[in-house]
Amino acid sequence: MAVCIAVIAKENYPLYIRSVPTQNELKFHYTVHTSLDVVEEKISAVGKAMADQRELYLGLLYPTEDYKVYGYVTNSKVKFVIVVDSSNTSLRDNEIRSMFRKLHNSFTDVMCNPFYNPGDPIQSKAFDGIVSGMMVQPS
Amino acid sequence: MADGVLFEFLHMEMVSHVFKDQQSTNGEMNNKDRAVCTSVLEGMGFRVGQGLIERFTRDSPSFKDELDIMKFICKDFWTQVFRRQVDNLRTNHQGTYVLQDNKFVLLTQLSSGKQYLDDAPKYLAYSCGVIRGALSSLGLDSVVTAEVSLMPSCKFQVVIQKL
């Protein structure tokens, strides 16, 4: 279960960011912001290894003492960042991948919505629903 | 399946509607009006292209370079949107690409003689927009134009804008 989920546009500004409300939200915003550097590094690093098939899932970006940050980039350079609690060790790679898949599918639906302008903050209730399903429920 | 036909009909009506709309404000169509109609259709295509790319590239890996992206447009993208592949892709390796489709699906319903050659570009504006939207979503700014010399084949010229 994630503690914070963010969707960042191609130009590196947030389209959607949501964190568990009980915590200090600014700290998560900052964590997501710093993770962007790591994402950029991974994207350009994969570019050098031309022979490999490039994957959209970037994996663990970096661990801090409390949290682990995972990244995923789409072909249209929209980035998804998920922050999970380090104490939650039962979360496996596959589960994170499936969370990103669900996010990507939901994001695709948002993009295809004719009332949505690409670049605007995401306000779709369906997207909110998917994200709530993945966040730690506030007790 | 009747899906493809539905869009063809919708497209024909779209073009006719946009042109009729513009014409009702003036008595006659001049070049400026034609340009407005073309950009309206192109704008529609642009937004659709962006959404389509999100859906089509959901599972495929990242593209290596510009040529890879153009090949994807010519094969997978063209197949999904226009139900065939581009017949010929030419490039000068400096950002200009010409995609030639010998039996463009939105032109097949018009007669293949010279009669409608002048009207054909109207029916290509939307598709130019779709290509431009797709490329923009993949990170390439471009200018897409189309020309018809022999119905129903047409050529799309894509010029990638470098910053």
Image (cartoon, coloured by chain):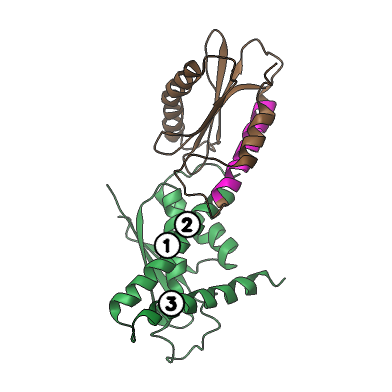
Where in the figure is residue B100, as x and y percent of width and height?
Answer: 44, 70
- Residue A95, magenta (yes or no): yes
Q: CA distance from mark 1 to mark 3?
A: 16 Å
Q: CA distance from mark 1 to mark 2?
A: 7 Å
Quadrant of the rendering where the N terminus of chain A is positioned? top right
Quadrant of the rendering where the C terminus of chain A is positioned? top right
Which chain is home to disc 3? B
Where in the figure is residue A26, as x and y percent of width and height?
Answer: 47, 18
Magenta stretch, residue numbers: A94-111
Residue on which disc 3 sits: B21
Instruction: Decide: is A63 above or below A13.
Output: above
Residue B91 location, quadrant: bottom left
- Residue A106, magenta (yes or no): yes
Q: Which mark is residue B43?
A: 1
Report the magenta stretch's main SS. helix
Q: Is residue B13 left or right of residue B129?
A: right
Q: Residue at x 40, y 81 (%)?
A: B24
Where in the figure is residue B2, as x and y percent of width and height?
Answer: 70, 72
Q: Nearer the viewer, residue B119 or A109?
A: A109
The colour one sees for chain B in the rendered image is green
Amino acid carrying mark 1 in the image: Gly
The reply to whether discs 1 and 2 touch (Cβ–Cβ < 8 Å) is: yes
Residue on which disc 2 sits: B47
Q: Neighbour class for label 1 at 10 Å: few (<14), some, many (≥20)?
A: some
Instruction: Decide: is A39 above or below A122.
Output: above
Q: Neighbour class for label 2 at 10 Å: few (<14), some, many (≥20)?
A: many
Q: Secondary structure at mark 3?
A: helix
Extreme front residue here? B25
The colour one sees for chain A in the rendered image is brown
Amino acid carrying mark 2 in the image: Arg
Q: Residue at x 36, y 79 (%)?
A: B25
Extreme top residue here? A65
